[in-house]
Amino acid sequence: MFGIANETNNAVALLKEIGLGEASLSNNLQTLANVDARYLRDLKINVTNALNAETLSKKEAYLIAIAVAANEKNAELQRSFEQFSTQNGATDKEIAEVLSCTSLLSANNVYYRFRHFMHDEFYNNAQAGIRMSIMANPLLGKEFFELVSLVVSALNGCELCVTSHEKTLVTHGSSKQRIHDAVRLGAVIRSLIVLL
């Protein structure tokens, strides 16, 4: 019994790391707590490391985490990351821009993935007809907007969008390490959401 209590403590420590309380202990987390402490420790380390990547400010890391939580439709985690981002200097307008970016990329990812799958001249030359004025002069700056766009596109599996945003980021002077850290953060937060 002592072992199970210890494992539950690991699950609760993970929740605390992301600003959630013991009441958020899901069946998935409890199942892992009952049998496998090792992965819970790994996941907590992964989340902590990803949120503390040297190439991302705390504000940027939490804004990317908001985009992932919104994209994956986890409102509770999104609210928690919004609080963390505000504590680290994000404004309501910046949070709204990240949510707008996430929504826009969800449309773009479906549309451009379809075009990529079809390999058809008609679709490749057709006007998208998707309004994207928020991309022109983003509040958070073009580089960070592109970084969020890349993470969301990677989550949604759009090769065309991923390669396009990565190329634009490199053109804007982003280091490949920063790009890597942002995508790793998106991947780790998504893996966390699977268990919440």
Image: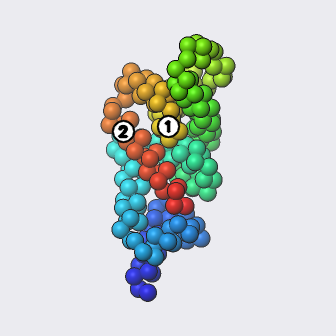
Residue neighbourhood size for the residue with mark 2, other residues' Cα within 10 Å, grouped as few (<14), some (14–19), many (≥20): some
Quadrant position of residue 128: top right
In this orientation, does residue 143 appear? Answer: no
Seen from the viewer's position, the closer of residues 129 and 60 is 129
Where's residue 102, x and y in %?
58, 37
Three-letter code, disc 1: Gly
Q: Which mark is residue 180?
A: 2
Give the vertical position of 15 relative to 156 (above or below): below
Residue positioned 38% across, 64% down in the render: 39
Residue positioned 39% across, 50% down in the render: 50
Q: Earlier in the sequence, mark 2 or mark 1?
A: 1
Q: Work out which quarter of the rendered image holds the C terminus and state it.
A: bottom right
Give the vertical position of 115 relative to 68 (above or below): above
Residue neighbourhood size for the residue with mark 1, other residues' Cα within 10 Å, grouped as few (<14), some (14–19), many (≥20): some
Q: Name the residue beneath numbered marker 1.
A: 157
In the drawing, does residue 28 fall left or right of residue 51?
right
Q: Mark 2 touching mark 1, by CB under 8 A?
A: no
In this orientation, does residue 71 appear? Answer: yes
Kind of element beneath mark 2: helix
Quadrant position of residue 13: bottom left
Three-letter code, disc 2: His
Residue positioned 41% across, 85% down in the render: 2
Seen from the viewer's position, the closer of residues 155 and 84 is 155
Residue positioned 57% across, 55% down in the render: 77
Where's residue 10, x and y in %?
42, 71
Where's residue 136, x and y in %?
57, 21
Q: Work out which quarter of the rendered image holds the N terminus and state it.
A: bottom left
Q: Name the outermost residue toward the bottom.
A: 1
Where's residue 170, x and y in %?
37, 25
